[in-house]
Amino acid sequence: MAEDAAGTVRGLCPPRFAAVRAAFEANFAEGREMGARFALAIDGEVVVDLIGGWADRAATRPFDETTLTPVFSTTKGVSALMIARLVGQGRLDYSDRVADLWPEFGAAGKDRLTVEQVLSHQAGLCGIPGPMDPAEWFDWHSLCARLAAMTPLWPPGTASGYHPVTFGYLAGEIFRRVDGRTLGRALREDIAGPLGLDLWIGLPESEDHRLSDVRRPPAMPNLGEITEPKRLAFFTKWAQPGGRGEAAWRRAEIPSANGHATAPALARLFAALAGHGRLDGVQVLAGGEAEAASRARIKGRDLVLPYDIAWGAGFIRNEGLGLYGPGREAFGHSGWGGSCAFADPETGVSGAYVMNRQSAELIDDARARRLIEAAYEAI
C-alpha cells in the first residue's frame, strides 16, 4: 500500500509490474491527479488494475471499483469499433459512399466521400459555421441535417482535420442508417450488457450516483496558430453542446465525446481489437476487422490538431507519435484531459487510463504515457 495526499493506491498489480505501480503513485505524489484508474490486459485478461484518489473535489468519496468517469474523445475509439462490427458482419464497407447510405449528405460536394474518409477526419466538417444555439447539439436530427447540408471547410479527401464533436454525429448517423438503432443503444445491447462491461454512450439516470466530479484543465489546449478549421472546431460559442445542463449531457448519445466508463471495461473491449476479435468466448469482431479498421487512411499534418497523425478508420495510429507504447501497429484513441484506450495486435496487449483531473492535453497526456511506458518495460 502507498499513501499519498489523494488517498490510498490499491488494486491488482503483480510484482512483475511494480514499475507501473510506481508510475501511478508518482502521478499522485506530484499533484497531477485527483482520482484515477489504469488497467492493462494481455490476451483479454486484466493483469493490472490500479485505483487511487478521490471521486469528488471535497475528497470525501474514494475513487473505487464502481466509479464512472467521462472519457470524452476516447469514446471515438469505441464508436470506431462499433462501425468495424458492421463491416465485419458484411453490412457495410469502408469504401461505401456515405451519400449512398445517407442521401442528404451528398450535398455541397460531399457526394463522393467514403465511410473511411469520414472516419479518418477527411470530410472537412470539423465544426459548424453557425451561428447556432449550443443546445442544438442535443437535437440529433437537426444537427445531422446541418452536417449533411454543410459545405466542407477544405476539399474533402485532401487532408485530415480532427472533428472533435461532429465525428460522433457522422459516425453515429452512418451506424443508424445501416443498423436502425443508435450506436449507444447497440453498444449496450450487443456488447457492454452481455459482456458485463461498465461502458456507456448515453448514461441512464440510475448510474449518476457513481459518477466522479471532473476538475477542468487550467487552460485550453495549445493548437498553435488559430485557423478557421481550428476556430470552428474549438473556439466558437457553439463549438460544444451547452445550455441544457450536465444531466442532459450525460443522457445524450454523442458517440464522439460523452462516453462514461471504467478503465477495465475499456481495456477489455480493446482486447478484442488487440486479439482475434474474441472476448470471453464472444466474437466481438470478425477476424481481420481490427487490422482493416486500424489501417492508415491518411498521414500528415492534421489541420486541427498540432500533430502529424496517421488516421485509421476512427483510430489514432501509434506510428510517429508513440502514445501507446513502442509498437508501430498499436492504435487507439485519447480523450481531452488525459483518458485513453489502446490495442496492440503485435503483443496482444490492451489498456486504458481514466481520471477526473483533466490536463490541457487532447491526445498526449504525460500521466498516461508514463503508465504505458512502464507497462511495456515489464512485458
Image (cartoon, rainbow, N blue to C red):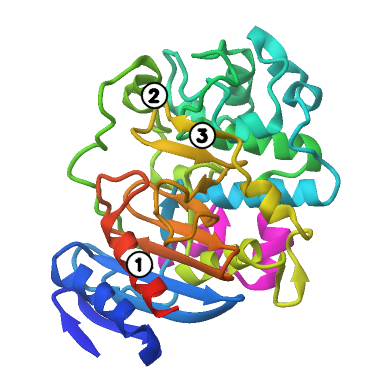
Amino acid found under the numbered disc labelled 2: Trp
Lateral position of residue 26 relative to residue 143, left or right? left
Q: Which one is in front, 168 or 22?
A: 22
Residues drawn in magenta? 187-210
In the image, farthest residue toward the right: 90
Relative height, residue 299 to residue 65 (above, below): above
On screen, 265 above or below 260? below
The residue depicted at 61 percent of the width and 75 percent of the height is 44
Specify whether 249 is left or right of 196: left
Residue 368, position in %: x, y? 33, 61
Q: Amino acid at mark 1?
A: Glu
Which quadrant is home to the N terminus?
Answer: bottom left
Residue 160 magenta: no
Q: Is residue 252 left or right of residue 38?
A: right
Q: Quarter of the image containing the C terminus?
A: bottom left
Q: Which residue is mark 2?
A: 238
Q: Which residue is mark 1?
A: 373
Indicate the secondary structure of the residue bearing disc 2: loop
- Residue 299 numbered mark, or none: 3
Q: Disc 2 or 1, which lies upstream in sequence?
A: 2
